[in-house]
Image (cartoon, helix red, strand yellow):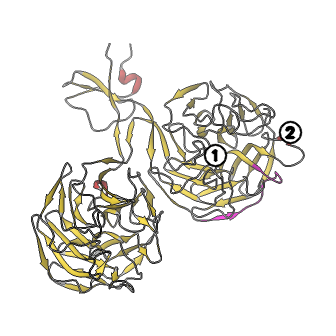
Amino acid sequence: MSTYREIIGKKIKKVSSDPSSGIEGEMWYNSTTGTLRGPAILSAWTSCGPLISTQGDMANLGTQTASLCAGGADGPTAENVNITQEGNGTGFSQGGNLNTERRGCAGFGVQTSAVCFGGYTTTYDNNTEEYNGTAWTNGNDTPVSPGTASWNSGGTLTAGLGYGGSYLGPPSPSNNGKQTIEYDGTNWADGNQMTRSSGDGMTGFGIQTAALAAGQSSVPGSPSATTVVENYDGTNWTSGTVTPTGVAYCGSGGTQTAGIIFGGVSDGSPGYPTKVTTTLSWDGTSWSSAPALATARQGTWGGPVGSNTASQLMGGNTGPAVVTNVENFDSSVIAVTSAAWSSGTNMGSARYGGQYFGTGKTSQVAVGGHIPGSPAFTATSETYNGTTWTEGNNINTARFNGGSGGTETAGLVVCGRNPYSAPAPQVYYSNVEEYNGTSYSEETDCPEAAYGKAGAGTQTAWVGVGGFLGPAPSPSYSTASQEYDGTNWTAGGAAPFQAVSMSGVGITTAAVIFGQQQNPAANDKVYDYNGTSWTAANDMNRNHGGQHSACGTVTSALVAGGSGPYADSALSELYDGTTWSTSATLGQSGLRGGKGTSSPAAIGAGGYGPGFFNATEEFTAETEATNIETFTTS
């Protein structure tokens, strides 16, 4: 009898506790529990940061950690779009727009070297575009004229493949869904047609010389999802092993000998209403069931993404609705826990526009702000320890939308204003208060009386910028920045923007300010500060407007919620110092409060959306851990 080491090449060791990680095939004996332990393969779908905007019936390609989707339709009315979105495995950012708005297009390649072709504009289209990771340029048209939509595809920029689709051009519709075309990086050439009946809605995976096509949605006179499979060797199509259930309009990933298909529809009735969560895995010999999707949907077949062990489903159509949610498929010894917002304990008072400071979800102070009633501003404060909110001492001057920074025991509140509807004239404050964990004390006034001033830093090293100067009817925007050392104010670098209700994180020598609410409209602008000057950084993906939760540093920040005239947001985004990408969605959209020094410890508390609320939400970042299990010894 062979030993485990002779078979696997690894020795079984005796340990008193499980290691923190391991690789497939590794095993050990845990002497404490008296069990044989080791990493085990775990197959599962988990949620990913959503698309920036709704998108279905589009081209998609790349890998799970470097994916791309382009074109498609944005809603029930099927309006064509030219949007490109790039994924990093945890969220999405905006890419360069296609030159032609279209749906039903297909793609192949990688995120920085991709092709999008075919589709439907106002007619069926044969246009080709190439992507370099930044912009799309027009290439040579496909040989199918006037064009084809709902292609399947695979391969690379210089060796691409298109097959199937809905063909309405000459010589007649009888060739619908059977054609094959190959791309060499410059030109397209016709290949041998498929042997199946005409139709579209099939799915597939593979490359130009080794592809697999499965299923089919419409046969003339008898719409249906089918089990038909064909294999392509670069020259000819031949029959393959049928799928266990009928499939159509599915997502896919992988190679001809190791692939995966998922979602789609199970019938061909008008509108294809029966969306499914089915996932099927192919090992080159047989099909088997894999874990189901969380959300049944169609409209994601425009190219394979990733492999049979690491794929991705982006957007799609759940019925009349086109959605933004994204799911990742993983089959490995690594267990992925998705980023998420979860409910915390409600605040004692519903409020928005208050001043927040602290390190994050286990240490947070909320003070002042607008509460229900008119006029109704408050001087009350609350402290959160990650479990409960506790009422603290009042601030000396009740105020709305001032700047803030610092920690639960060393906080800072700067400027702000009195109620909009106060019977007395509007007042913009310059006064500054510091918090020592128990009470607030008046300190040296800020050089400007301002409302909506953004700030970042600590009680003794803080920078503030922007805001409204002076009350209605003719307030002006400030472009000045001021730095505070705990005692004195000095002028900082002038800002190249005019804005109010921005958010900021970081320190005086390394800060980032984002999410302006600027008259007449909000925008998605971002600026970095190095202690001397402000420079424009990459925009956020979504216009969050003003009053968001903001946590982190200049190289690792999170923004969540906000309201830009006049749409409430539930989206959160992560910033790595260069790029913004989508992350988990808040349970309650709207203006949110929260401040912190660590983006994984972000908090969203209180808000308005419309109506006041006291909900608290806590952010947990995505994590990965080895999936360790006990194995039988009998």
Helix, strand or loop for disc 1: loop
Helix, strand or loop for disc 2: helix
Q: Residue at x 57, y 61 (%)?
A: 133
Determine whether, in the image, residue 496 is placed left or right of residue 31.
right
Q: What residue is shown with label 2?
A: 174
The vertical placement of 245 against 600, above or below, is above
Mark 1–mark 2 contact, CB under 8 Å? no
Determine whether, in the image, residue 406 is placed left or right of residue 262.
left
Q: Residue at x 41, y 83 (%)?
A: 496
Depth check: 507 or 340 in front? Answer: 340
Depth check: 586 or 44 in front? Answer: 586
Q: Residue furthest right?
A: 171
| Residue 565 belongs to the span the image colors magenta | no
The amino acid type, in three-letter code, at marker 2 is: Ser
Mark 1, mark 2: which one is toward the viewer?
2
Q: In which quadrant will I find the C terminus? A: top left
Depth check: 378 or 354 in front? Answer: 378
Q: Can residue 346 be seen in the rendering of this structure?
A: yes
Residue 186, x across and y down, in percent: 74, 58
The image quadrant of residue 564 is: bottom left
Q: In which quadrant will I find the N terminus? A: top left
- The label on residue 303 is 1
Residue 126, x across and y down, in percent: 77, 55
Which class describes the residues within 10 Å of circle 1: few (<14), some (14-19), or many (20+)?
many
Residue 572, x across and y down, in percent: 40, 57
Sequence-wise, the earlier of marks 1 and 2 is 2
The amino acid type, in three-letter code, at marker 1 is: Gly
Residue 276, x across and y down, in percent: 57, 34
The residue range painted magenta reads: 135-148
